[in-house]
Image: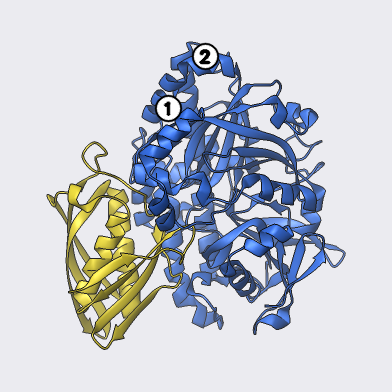
Amino acid sequence: MKISEVEPCIWEIPPTEKPGMRVPARILATKELIDTMDEGVFNQVTNVACLPGIVKYALCMPDGHWGYGFPIGGVAAFDLKEGVISPGGIGFDINCGMRLLRTNLVLEEVEPVLEKLIDTLFYLVPAGVGCKGFLKLNKKEFAEAVKEGAPWAIRKGYGWPEDVQYIEQGGSLPEANPEKVSEKALGRGMEQLGTLGSGNHYLEVQVVKEENVFDWETAQKFGIEFPNQIVVMIHCGSRGFGHQVATDYLRVFEKAMPKYGITVIDRELGCAPFGSPEGQDYHQAMLCAANAAFANRQVIIHRIREAFEKVLGKSAEELGMHTVYDVAHNIAKIEEYEINGKPKKLLVHRKGATRSFGPGDADICPAYREVGQPVIVGGSMETGSYLLAGTKRAHELTFGSTLHGSGRTMSRTAAKKKVQGRALQEDMRRRGILVKTVSYAGLAEEAGMAYKDIATVVEAVHQIGISRKVARLKPIGNIKG
Amino acid sequence: MGRYEFIPGVAIADLAFEVEAETLEELFTLSARALFEAMVELKDVRPVEEVKISLSAEKLDNLLFDYLAELVYQKDLEARVFSEFEVSISENGNFKLEGKAKGEKIDPAKQELKTDVKAITYHLFKLEKRDKGYYARVVLDT
């Protein structure tokens, strides 16, 4: 496939390379990253470029890898009239995302109680296959929760009113309509609020080392104020509820496509015109799942505050456990961009990509508006994670998007053959990272060696300018499903 | 005798398996076993509870997709994992499946759990009739 570097670190595949491509495909990466990207990325990003109503480019971020339908790291914007909505451009785990909490604790205060803290967190935040939460809701109550999102959880006493200011779009997407969600989806998800799930989802206690802060001024705006400060990060999504919504609509779209004369190269790219009844129904159902994920992360951080209170013997308020930010990295949202010199509303799909709005954007809470939104990038449990800030350049280049993580390079099956879960746990303990897991096989699959080097992918987005480095966060304790 | 195998390198972030079977029924039950083997050590799951499954689909491959998706749904609904499966498949315009799945409640103290499966995907999804039976390839979102 013909690919050329049109600007430093921006690689373009012209529409002449595949029949049906409506726009060029663009991959953002350094030379080193593009050379090692799997073939699936090139194939999938050019498939996305074939979808009706796509605007400007089909994009892939530097952490991109082979997914299903869209590549992971895929971003595409669609015209609201001519374009489509596709579950394959959002992922099964709708609004999988990250939340970062800060504390006023330093490493020296937490180290002596770390084991007890991790045990308490492990008990209070259920993880693993089919896990259920402490909230026992019926379908009607759960439907209320998914209509409202994070504010529902706060109203029920799980969190602080200030939290919503620090969640992408206030943790509540108003067009969510539970009537568009199946009984099955409600039944599957109603007892899972407050749970992590499994796979690459985790809860992590991290430390901010002085040498890992790249921009103290911005860090301080985000509440990262002193060396050795302790923060807590979670990575999880909408659990079985979102997975069921995606599964249900994949089948709906498969049946609907012939009616709209749409054919797709890959069945995972099943879609419907955004304005069609099927497209609108999925949009409203998908937003319910997005709200469910915001509510899930809200309930989880409430439990994290409880765990710290129990172990440290102080209130969460005294411990300064404020939300830094909460970002979605599997979602589609209506946002406005300048197209041919005119502002235009578009449906931006982000699958394994994070919103990265820059300074001055009205969608960012006042506390951060001057510096750009926080972007939370989850790394592997061995190598650490990053806190970045959004930029105006992302608005121009990538429909306000950036990377979401480090990106896998090795399959789960291959990782399990190379690494043993218990040995890895012991090895990480020696390196100062305490890991507690429901599944040792699952732990082995998440070994750092199965991922790209996060520093390299973060360096790429920093160089390209679609977000900028603020701090690297080093894990000291991790809980995995 | 049929077989199933997890295949590396097909879906980097996820899990993929392929199945070969002499009959359609065997193809479906082996696929179900592979699905649960991704999540739990099957020998740890006692077949003490039973759910009935009844489905129909317009095409055979959709029937397999819906069958596996139904099992994933059942896993979350009552937090159960399954280790024994029975199905019968008939065709009368549509394809129809009647089946049972046997298993028990998830209990990390008694079962070695692995990775949760979020969904069945259409990525490289395949069901085909071959000379000596049937073949299927399934990628699981994990």
Total number of numbered labels?
2
In the rendered structure, the answer to whether residue A420 lies left or right of residue A277 reads left
Q: Nearer the viewer, residue A48 or A199?
A: A199
Please state which amino acid type lies under the numbered disc 2: Ser
Which residue bears the numbered disc 1?
A: A121
Residue A84, compared with residue A190, is above or below; it is: below
Q: Residues within 10 Å of mark 2 (few under 14, many from 20)?
A: some
Mark 1: secondary structure = helix
Mark 1 vs mark 2, CA separation in Å:
16 Å
Which is more toward the observer, A455 or A329?
Answer: A455
| Quarter of the rendering occupied by the N terminus of chain B | bottom left
Residue at 51%, 27% in the rendered image: A432
Task: Return the x and y of residue A101 as percentages of the image width and height.
Answer: 59, 29
Name the residue located 39 percent from the left edge and 38 percent from the top edge: A423
Which chain can be seen in yellow? B
Frontmost of labels 1 and 2 is: 1
Residue sitting farthest toward the right: A341
Residue B29, quarter of picture? bottom left
Chain A's shade in the image?
blue
Q: Residue at x 50, y 56 (%)?
A: A410
Residue that label 2 marks: A315
Chain for disc number 1:
A
Query: Where does the image place residue B52, in percent across and percent down from the top left?
Result: 18, 61
